[in-house]
Amino acid sequence: MLLGRDELITTLFRETDRAQRLKTGLAVILCGIDRWERCLERLEMRARAEVEHEITRRIARVLRCYDSLGSSEGGEYCLILPGCNSFQAVGMAERLRQEAFGTKIFVEDEELALEACFGVAGSGGRSPLVVLRNAEQALRAARAQGTGSVERSSYDTEPDSKAFPIVTIDDMVKSR
């Protein structure tokens, strides 16, 4: 189920409370689709809805049953990942980049190659709105880096990244 902005904020507050109470991780990923408006200009309203549905389906396929997904205008999606720290969420963002945006979408004789940037932030017990702001800043930094970039918020209060190895799909394929 795709959450609206208000539902997303409510869910983020609830999950932050749970993470603090259980002393577990919580991460947020903001996914911004590159050149979203330009892609939609070529399509009619029905086709736009099909593209949005396909993107949502692809993202949801990667998520766990207890993760939350919301969207806002302008081709941005927010993922709330209970039990994840920001280092693990970077791995999830890499997986999303490859699996959700790695293949073209075909709709009404149009072939769309959508790409996205990702901003990741870990809760570390902070206010949900601060975590969301940090994820937004990380998304802006990822967009500045260029298409397909993943940036982790530098404000995270988690231990050093060496304590949490990031395994990407490419790493898993290489190890086989």
Image (cartoon, helix red, strand yellow):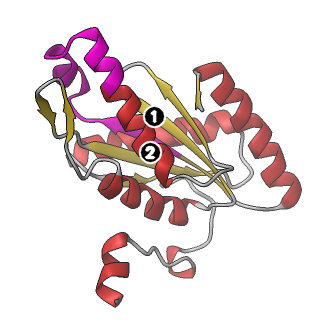
The picture quadrant where one finds residue 49 is top left
- The magenta stretch spans residue 38: yes
In this orientation, which residue lies closer to the viewer: 3 or 85?
3
What kind of residue is marked 2? Ile
Which numbered dot is residue 77?
A: 1
Q: Quadrant of the C terminus?
A: bottom left
* 111 is higher (above) or lower (below) than 89: above
- The magenta stretch spans residue 110: no
Q: Looking at the picture, how far across and down is residue 53, in whole percent? A: 40, 29
For marks 2 and 1, give the one nearer the viewer: 2
What kind of residue is marked 1? Tyr
Q: Residue furthest front?
A: 108
| Residue topped by disc 2 | 59
Q: Quadrant of the N terminus?
A: top right
Q: What range is drawn magenta here?
A: 29-50
Q: Count neighbours of disc 2 (C-alpha within 10 A) and say few if under 14, some if 14 to 19, many if 20 or more.
A: many
* 74 is higher (above) or lower (below) than 141: above
Q: Is residue 157 visible?
A: yes
> Disc 2 to disc 1, how far (Cα)?
9 Å
In this orientation, which residue lies closer to the viewer: 17 or 39?
39
* 45 is higher (above) or lower (below) than 102: above
In this orientation, which residue lies closer to the viewer: 65 or 13?
65
Q: Please report whichever mark, 2 or 1, sits nearer to the chain's N-terminal start.
A: 2
Q: Is residue 138 visible?
A: no
Q: Looking at the picture, how far across and down is residue 123, in whole percent? A: 66, 51
Q: Looking at the picture, how far across and down is residue 9, in whole percent? A: 67, 28
Disc 2 + disc 1, Cβ < 8 Å: yes
Point 38% across, 47% down: residue:
118
Q: Looking at the picture, how far across and down is residue 116, in whole percent? A: 29, 42
* 41 is higher (above) or lower (below) than 161: above
